[in-house]
Structures are given as structure tokens and as C-alpha cells.
Amino acid sequence: MAELSLSRKLLDASRSLADEATEALRDRGITDLRPSQAAALLLVDRMGGTRLSDLAQRADVTKQAMMQVVDDLASIGCVRRTPDLNDARAKVVKLTAKGLRHRAAARKAIQSVEARARRRLGDRRYDALSAALVDLGSEEE
């Protein structure tokens, strides 16, 4: 059997962690949130909300991609858009009461997945993997 490429190994690991996050969310009674949406909720400032462009920058995705995630979160009642008082053209994404509850559950779910990964790998391998992924993700050579 041929050795899997690094890209495929990373994809498989990412899918496995996403599946674990989905299960951890379900364990907390959250069935209407995908891991990517959970991660996006954690980017929204708890008090005052966050502009869509800032969310996109924090997530390192396009504004259009973040707009889709925000649309999905709005459709399930986790966020709402309000006018930006400093810029009439912009909107601020704010957490609803449901969004605050889901955000808290998402934080705990993600922490539990990362804690399981740390236990599985051990501290040294976990830290080395984390550092290696940062290196791979940087644009420097």
C-alpha cells in the first residue's frame, strides 16, 4: 500500500478532529452547529460584537466566506447584524442569547478535543506538532 501524502494525512487528521468536535458539541446538547461555525462564534467579541471584515481577517478567510458563515449562524439564531455606528456602510455581528450559550459550549467542546489530542500524543509531541503546523502555515521560507 502506498504511503499517504502529507496533505492527505493533514486532511484526515483535520476531519477526525472535526468529527470529535461535532460529537463534543452534541454531548453538550448542540446539534445545530458545525465545527467551523463553532470556531467562528469564538471570533465574535462577546461585548459589542465584531465587524464582518474583522471576523474574516481573524479567521484568515475572505469576507465572502465569512459572510456565508455569518448567514448560517444568523439563520439558526446565534448572531444578528446591526449597523456599525462608526461606518454606515458596515455591519457589526453580535451574539444573541443563543449565540452566547452556543459560544460557551463551543469553547468547552474545542478545549475537550484539544485536551484529548494532547493526551493521545503527549505534551512533547503535541507541542511539536503545533509548532510544525504553525511553520507550515507561515508564508516564510
Image: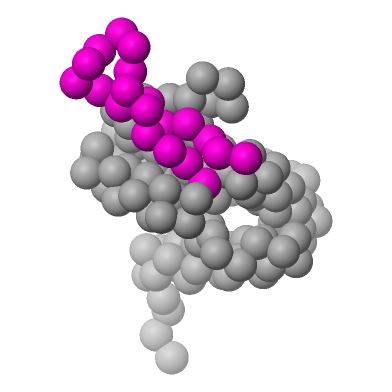
Left or right of 101? Residue 78 is left
Q: Is residue 47 above or below residue 130?
A: above
Q: Is residue 63 above or below residue 86?
A: below
**Residue 85 lies in the magenta stretch:** yes
If the image is split into quadrants, where does the C terminus sit? Answer: top left
If the image is split into quadrants, where does the N terminus sit? Answer: bottom left
Q: Residue at x 34, y 12 (%)?
A: 85
Could you tell me if residue 100 is visible in this image?
Answer: yes
71 or 13: nearer the viewer? 71
92 or 107: nearer the viewer? 92
Left or right of 71? Residue 49 is right
Q: Residue at x 68, y 45 (%)?
A: 101
Q: Is residue 8 above or below residue 36?
A: below
Q: Position of residue 95 (x, y in %)?
A: 53, 35
Q: Residue at x 51, y 61 (%)?
A: 34
Q: Position of residue 92 (x, y in %)?
A: 37, 26
In the picture as drawn, the residue positioned furthest to the bottom comes out as 1
Question: Which segment did they paint magenta?
Answer: 78-97
**Quarter occupied by residue 7:** bottom left
**Residue 13 lies in the magenta stretch:** no
Q: Position of residue 41 (x, y in %)?
A: 52, 41
Left or right of 127? Residue 135 is left
Q: Residue at x 61, y 67 (%)?
A: 31
